[in-house]
Image (cartoon, rainbow, N blue to C red):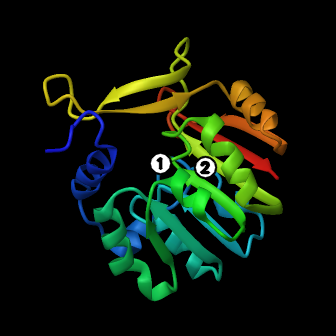
Amino acid sequence: MPDATTDIPSYWDRYARGVAPQDPGEVLASAGWTQYPGHGPGFELLGDAASALELGFGRGAAVAALASQGVKATGVDLAPAAVDRAREQWGHLGTEFHHADAVEFLTGADQRWEAIYSVWGAAWFTEPGTLFPLVRDRLEPGGRFVFSCAPAVPGSYGVQGMYGAGFNGRRVWVYRWAYEPEAWEEILAGHGFRQVRAWEEPAPEPDHVGTLIASAVR
């Protein structure tokens, strides 16, 4: 039996299987950078990219939304259940969905994209020093890297552990990385990105959690 503490693909597969199905129209309507449907900036942050790769696509809504706009849209996800569901739901749009770890996929890729992005996905759950150089290498010159995730809890920065089954469940955990916007900008610039910008997009309600969004250019 796999070790539950280290079997990360199984963790994300269990997570994907637990996501309730939604109407395709509802899923597409909720595609965006924030956790609040219809709130915040749209995919104009990717510029006029003709090709785009999502790292950790989840439901596949963002990939599908871009494909419906004529973008050659590709996604990679670690969860087999997410890949199977996305292929079944969005394959008719000409999308490509790959089952792989984001780092391994980028390492083995033999092409470049005009945009690489992550909506609350792998960019948050992968060590930046490992992921960001690979992203930059797989971007076309002038290509954009954009990601969103939760803002850091004040005073709590860097790598953080998260128990996936709660405090009274099995010992299953994953790691994620959290920084203030200024720190994300420094990290991106340190890996050779230009036109770097990171900010916290406010929530619709003033006392709710906002969204950390970062954008950079190769």
Q: Nearer the viewer, residue 178 or 137?
A: 137
Alpha carbon separation for disc pair 1 and 2:
8 Å
Expressed as whole percent of the image width and height from the top left, the position of residue 174 reads 36, 34
> Is residue 201 visible in this depiction of the protein?
no
The residue at which mark 2 appears reads as: 40
Q: Quadrant of residue 180?
A: top right
181, above or below 196, in the image:
above
Proximity of marks 1 and 2: CB atoms separated by less than 8 Å: yes
- Tag 2, which secondary structure? loop
User: Which residue is the site of mark 1?
Assistant: 36
Q: Specify the label residue 113 is tagged with.
A: none
Q: Residue at x 71, y 25 (%)?
A: 183
**Residue placed at 81% from the left, 51% from the top?**
217
Name the amino acid type tagged 1: Tyr
Q: Residue furthest top?
A: 155
Which residue is drawn at the image coordinates 66% and 70% (left, top)?
A: 110
Query: Residue 95, percent across and down?
Result: 51, 79
Left or right relative to 2: residue 44: right
Dot 2: few (<14), some (14–19), or many (≥20) neighbours within 10 Å? some
Residue at 45 percent of width and 69 percent of height: 98
Position of residue 67 relative to residue 10, above or below, is below
What amino acid is labelled 2 in the image? Answer: Gly
Front residue of this view, candidates 158 and 111:
111
Point out residue 97 in the picture as x, y percentages from the top left corner: 46, 72
Q: Which quadrant of the figure contains the N terminus?
A: top left
Q: Nearer the viewer, residue 59 or 172?
A: 172
**Horizontal arrangement in the rendering, residue 126 relative to residue 146 (left or right):** left
**Callout 1: SS:** loop
